[in-house]
Amino acid sequence: MKGIVTGGAGFIGSHLVDKLLSLGWEVIVIDNESAQSNEEFFWNKNSQNYKLDICDYDKINPLFKGVDFVFHLAAESRIQPAIKNPIQAAQTNVVGTCNILQSAREHGIKKVLFSSTSSAYGLINKPPLCENMPKDCLNPYSVTKCSGEELCTMYTKLFGVKTVIFRYFNVYGDRQPLKGQYAPVVGIFLRQVKNSEPMTIVGDGLQRRDFTHVSDVVEANILAACSQSKLINGQIINIGTGQSHSVLELSKMIGKDFVHIPTRVGESKETLADITRAQEWLNWSPKIFLEDWINEQNIFCD
């Protein structure tokens, strides 16, 4: 098998690249190293690596020749930076995604696996969150990622390009972004504990999240790529654990000092995935849970 992984030098993408290579795939990586929260990027020397922007259609399009599957993870993937620069978010998440889909269409790609976000559910939907609930986009990030979802569905219906849309719930694990104030909360806490700083809890810390380990996300992508089921084409599938923890609970699991900082706009109060589709359609279920992972991290231990 031959696959393209966009964003393949980043957090989730690099784990996917490593796994595909271990399974004997030939892998092409496209990444422009633009993720602001990444302290480093993870290029696998055994993949074919291209430092390119997905918005540059003419440069990325030839790389799709002879490829079987495309795993599209490249994105402006943080809420607060997207609020600060909506134009960049729209350019990357909408135009860039359209470039990927059009290239897939022109080169007869078997399937495009699109990484989207649980922030599509917003505030109006009561957890557990199901894929058929209405969208409630609170910020430019969720708007642009949902636009990418719509493009995937349209390319499936109109042009026959097989797509699968994943909505990830708060992914964490090794290589997670650590840099800056808008990195994911597990990464921020990891950095702060490492630096002997108090953990910073946004608002009251009662906001709840469904924390999903990166290895489970990788497995879902590979299962969907290899699935022969027509049921998943053009469909949205949640990837979470079906469990949620408050940020305050997370800090207490770690057991270090913390302080509270002001609340932020444009963020949901609770995410909790209904993972029935993933279980029934992909035979997928989460294997790693937050508290177990934290207990294995030496940095969090006295």
Image (cartoon, grey):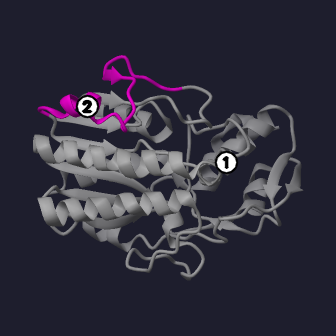
Give the residue furthest to the top.
Answer: 45
Q: Who's the residue at 54% across and 81% down the image?
A: 125
Q: What range of the chain is rendered magenta?
A: 41-66
Residue underneath mark 2 = 58
Q: Quadrant of residue 279?
A: bottom left
- Three-letter residue code for mark 2: Asp
Q: Quadrant of residue 59?
A: top left
Q: Which residue is mark 1?
A: 186
Quarter of the image for the N terminus: give it: top left
Q: In the shown orientation, is residue 207 left or right of residue 214?
A: right
Taking the image as shown, residue 260 lies to the left or right of residue 1, namely right
**Marks 2/1: CA–CA distance:** 37 Å
Q: Position of residue 165 (x, y in %)?
A: 33, 60
Which of the two residues, 277 or 98, is positioned nearer the viewer here? 98
Amino acid type, residue under disc 1 in the picture: Val
Judge the density around disc 1: few (<14), some (14-19), many (≥20) Cα neighbours within 10 Å: many
Q: Residue at x 26, y 67 (%)?
A: 281
